[in-house]
Amino acid sequence: MDPEQRAGLLAPSPEDLAQVKVFPLIPALRKDVTKTIDSALTWEQLTAADINWAIVRPIVNKYASLRNMAVIYACLVVRQYFLAESESELAFAGVMLARADFCEILAIKLLNRFGTNYIQLIAVLTTAWSPLAGAPQHVLDTVKQTMNADDDDDIDTAHSAIEMAIQTEAKDLLAAPIAQKVVNDIYAGKVVFSAVANRSILADNYKPRAIEIYNAKQSPFLDHYRLRVPKYGAYLEFINFALLLLTLVLSLSNQDKAHLTNWEIAFMVFAAAFMFEEYTAATEHGWIIYIANIWNAFDFSLIVIFFAYFGLRIKGLSAGDVDMSAMAFDVLSCAACILFPRLAFFAVSDNVVVLSLRAMIAQFVFFIGIAAICFSGLLFTLWTLAGDSTNHEGHAWTFKSIAWLMVQIWFGNTYLSFAQATSFHPLFGPILMTVFAALSNTLLLTILISILSNTVARIDANATQEYLYQFTISTIEGVKSDALFSYQPPFNILAFLILKPSSWFLSPRSLHSLNVFLIKLTSLPQLIVIGIYERYLADGRKFRESSIDVAQALFSKLPRHIKNMPLVEALVGSTSNDLFEAIFDVDVELTSEYDLFLGYDDDERVGLRSRTSRETLGGGAGATSVKNEEIGAKKTPKRRPRKLSPSPSPLGKARERGRAQSPAGSMKMSLNEPSPVEGTGPSFNVPQTPRGSNPATPAERGQKQKLRVQSLLSPMDAVMSPEALTSTSSSRSPLARLFTQKMFPNEQQVAVAAQAEAGVRRIEALLEDVKELPVQRLKEEMKELQDRQARIENLLLMLTRGMRNETPHRQGTT
């Protein structure tokens, strides 16, 4: 089979992707979002738990049930619509921005639903969807009429979901781990796909490759598709910039204003190839995605400088003007200000300063432009007031000299404003220059510094998202479908000169064969290096793993004092991480030697019960025995002994008779303690193991615990028990078994509950018999005792009263 036609496992076929309906999703999403969000909410409010549960989740479930792979793309299309509306409808800008953020949140939630099938996830993000796919004919006619299009090709604009996320600046979506997984695999070349070229300068759509996971062993050694891997493209781009910088330095070092040197010709060729590559990238992905990359802004500045140099140089050579050629070299020297940092930024591309540099430059240029417009009136006023006057150096004031003076004052040289003020006008000159110095150095510069500081702080707060956003842009730019991207400068110009005329008369198959031949011919060294690296030196390859094993073996033989040297540890790394990995690589079976919970049953563990439920299970004093049995205690807790009367009362006899007739003879009944089932009535306590007896085994303790829980179930719980839950109790989690036992008891629990109910009924009958006992005699005896006690108290009172009357008499007689 042709390796270019291999399809990945479970990858969607092009026919399936072509049948996906995209257009019906767009108006449906717009309607739901508009109906749902009608307030200006922030991102934090939209991602709150209550809104996520009440608003986001129902809509996500609604569209996830469709299993439409274009739903992420449709969410981003609707997001772009609301962003455009926020710029036109200024009165409702906050609401529109909230709806745009809501669309991004929906896209993130829906993207997680495709994470189970990785190949399908890649197709969702990388397939170029057409927004009019699945639209009825009258919609197509209306769109054509609105856009003044003649045929379907004019309205056929396809983008992938990643490109739409870049275009709408959906940075949170691109920073999501599931999206970055796909982006990282595309960057490393682990995911292989080819998009159909619709806007390319030279399209080669023959034999499109299906989405697949790359396998170096099944691919040809000289695989020309590997030149489009962004990881390898970054290294090749670095080499191309290095060659461009080298030719620039050599051409400036060997200037010949009258003739072209060899180094200058080489620089022109490399610069032309570089500009052609940038133009191809902007054509393929569009200007919005191209300029969103911070490095492309620097590259565009380099192109402007080169055009200025080339125009001056050609004009100077054709006219024989040496000064014009010298001016051309002066302009070219300014390109070094961009090329040197551009080459150095390959190593620090993820730094916060580098990330914020583009935004700061854009805001600085915009602010300077506004300031120039504001002070243009002052410039004209000073030029009018100066007239024929001269400055302190004796030169007449010109428009250029006044502008240069204002620039110097703007950037801090305020002394010039006071020194030259009277030369413009004796009265208005000092006033105008003082106002200008105060505004420029105090007010406007303070505002500029504040704006730039806020920009750096904002980017620093979102540095990770900003870096991943730029990384995604460079990755998608690396996977380009234009055939010219497989050629390294300056061979891309040669390929264009050969293949573009050939595409007019060659068949697609012949053009493809010619294109592959030229790629392998011009990029043979690069393909050989890539093939050797992927087969022997990449991660997971046998040669690399064996080399690592040999290095580790040599390192392990080194003396300990050498291993612990700071320099060796910095180069090799700490061995503690290797120790941790080795511990988790050991496959330990939980035998009796390692199992910490061997003697415990899942139902015995009290971690799933609260303190109140554990006390309720035992019922007062019996809770202590339940707890001790659950944790396997060998000692019986001491109880306070109860005082027994010498002769049992009729009530005590009835209690003993009821205990003897109870079906659960081993249980104690306490009439003075609340029942855990009904709140009042008897409670059942399991007798504790006496001292000296053999303790129960874990299995017996588990069975007793189950019987205790089952004995507390009410008859209403027995009616609700489904039979299907009894057979699957072992496969459920401990928490599920706990609540299932409470809510849905099995047949054994129903039988025990029935016995408990019968015992309660017998106790009620015994209580009725107690009411009929001859207790009247007991009441009379108690009344007689009370009367005797009252008489004795009266007698004692009389005696003490007499003694109190005698005491004063005796004291008086003495």
Image (cartoon, grey):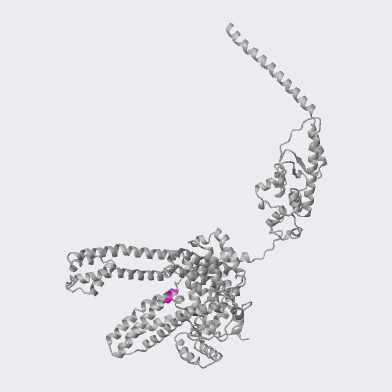
**Against 742, is 556 above or below?**
below
Q: Is residue 750 left or right of residue 356?
A: right
Instruction: Return the x and y of residue 98 as percentages of the image width and height.
Output: 49, 64
**Image side of residue 119 versus residue 411, left or right:** right
Residue 355: % across, % down? 43, 70
Image quadrant where one finds the N terminus: bottom right
Q: State the residue in front, 56 or 205.
A: 56
User: Which range of residues does the magenta coloring cover?
Assistant: 292-296
Q: Nearer the viewer, residue 797 or 34?
A: 34
Picture quadrant where residue 254 is located: bottom left
Task: Inspect the magenta stretch and tell me whether residue 295 lies in it.
Answer: yes
Viewer-proximal residue, 691 or 324?
324
Q: Is residue 761 left or right of residue 471?
A: right
Residue 198 visible in the snapshot: no
From the top left corner, tell me how far across and down residue 37 is, in percent: 52, 63
Question: Hey, which quadrant is residue 277 in on the image?
Answer: bottom left
Inspect the magenta stretch and tell me whether residue 157 lies in it.
no
Q: How many marks?
A: 0
Secondary structure predominantly adopted by residues drawn in magenta: helix
Of the pair 346 and 737, the residue shown nearer to us = 737
